[in-house]
Image (spheres, rainbow, N blue to C red):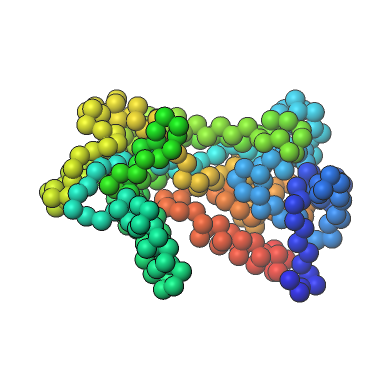
Amino acid sequence: MNRPNLDVQTNALSTRMEFEGKKAVALRYRQKGQEVRVECRGEIILCGGTINSPQLLELSGIGDGEFLQKMGIETVRHLPGVGENLQDHLTVNTQCSLADVPTFHDELKPLGMVKNLAKLAFKRKGLLIHPASQVGAFFRSSDDAERPDAQIHFTPAAGEPDEKGRINPLPGTTATVCYLRPTSRGSVHLRARNPETHPIIRANYLNTDNDIEKTIAVVQKTREIFRAPSLKKYYRGELQPGPEADTDEKVLEHIKRVAESVYHPVGTCKMGKDDMAVVDDRLRVRGLENVRVADGSIMPTILSGNTNATCVLIGERCADFILNKE
């Protein structure tokens, strides 16, 4: 990149920020086994995301003072909210078998794969130009919900892992569904002072009665969709959770067995004015100079949908604040 104001360092791991009083003056990073120190003439902008931004703050002495003392790190700024308030969306697979309708199962058999690879290579057409999830929708988990609070995606494929963990494709469809307004809260904190050691991530999924009840409800709604009269001629039976899951308790067992993150973690450096807030309304770390956080970790509450666009907006707003010297 031919830009005099941009220097990209690759294969580098930020290890800590240095301060003079409450003012950030340098950043240290590790690259090819060497420790490098870069002086700060303007500001240090943390964009490590919900996991790594609080990690770097704590490594730099910013966080709960008592915790930092236990880790042997000198406290630069006591901010107990660093690493707290972790939120994420949890998705659950529901599958059914189908007949008389094409699925990935048919199209990705050896001969079908050759055909689709040829279409992709020569015509930019065919199955392989499509995303895995081809239909998405929002819906209410219950009739008394004020607005849609669940999200669902459909993929024209189903599969079960065998004893070796390999996926056996089946002619069917998979619906991945998640409850969008979880009340469970987790945390991200240092495991060790070594920046190469991954932090301890406690997601605390399904840690409240609300989240358990709502997640069961959205899975049950998905099962109703599969059994709808309009799909009767295609529907050949449920694969997951399976017909034996005939109570909410058994559905919950299925949820705990197959649920996964949707990769929407937010909240561990939240914006606000209360004692647990980490950044102010200009993304500046409270009580410090020359340090901002610009990523999903600053969201006080998780969005009712995908987080990508909002993270882009946070970056754009941070750029505005810096250019306008706010």
Residue 17: tell me if it is visible. no
Instruction: Where is residue 140? Give x, y as percent.
Output: 28, 47
Instruction: Where is residue 226? Give x, y as percent.
Output: 21, 45
Quadrant into which the N terminus falls:
bottom right
Classify 315 as above or below 222.
below
Q: How many marks?
A: 0
Q: Residue placed at 80% from the left, 72% from the top?
A: 4
Quarter of the image where one finds residue 290: bottom right
Quarter of the image where one finds residue 77: top right
Hey, which residue is sitting farthest front in the picture? 111
Left or right, 311 with respect to 218, comes to: right
Classify 220 as above or below 325.
above
Q: Residue placed at 59% from the left, 34% from the top?
A: 201
Classify 161 as above or below 100.
above
Instruction: Where is residue 129? Give x, y as percent.
Output: 41, 64
Left or right, 78 with respect to 179, comes to: right
Left or right, 102 with respect to 161, comes to: left
Quadrant into which the C terminus falls:
bottom right
Left or right, 44 with respect to 118, comes to: right
Q: Residue placed at 22% from the left, 55% from the top?
A: 101
Q: Nearer the viewer, residue 173 or 200?
A: 173
Residue 172: tell me if it is visible. yes
Classify 115 as above or below 215.
below
Instruction: Where is residue 124? Give x, y as percent.
Output: 43, 71
Q: Residue placed at 36% from the left, 33% from the top?
A: 255
Q: Nearer the viewer, residue 178 or 96?
A: 96
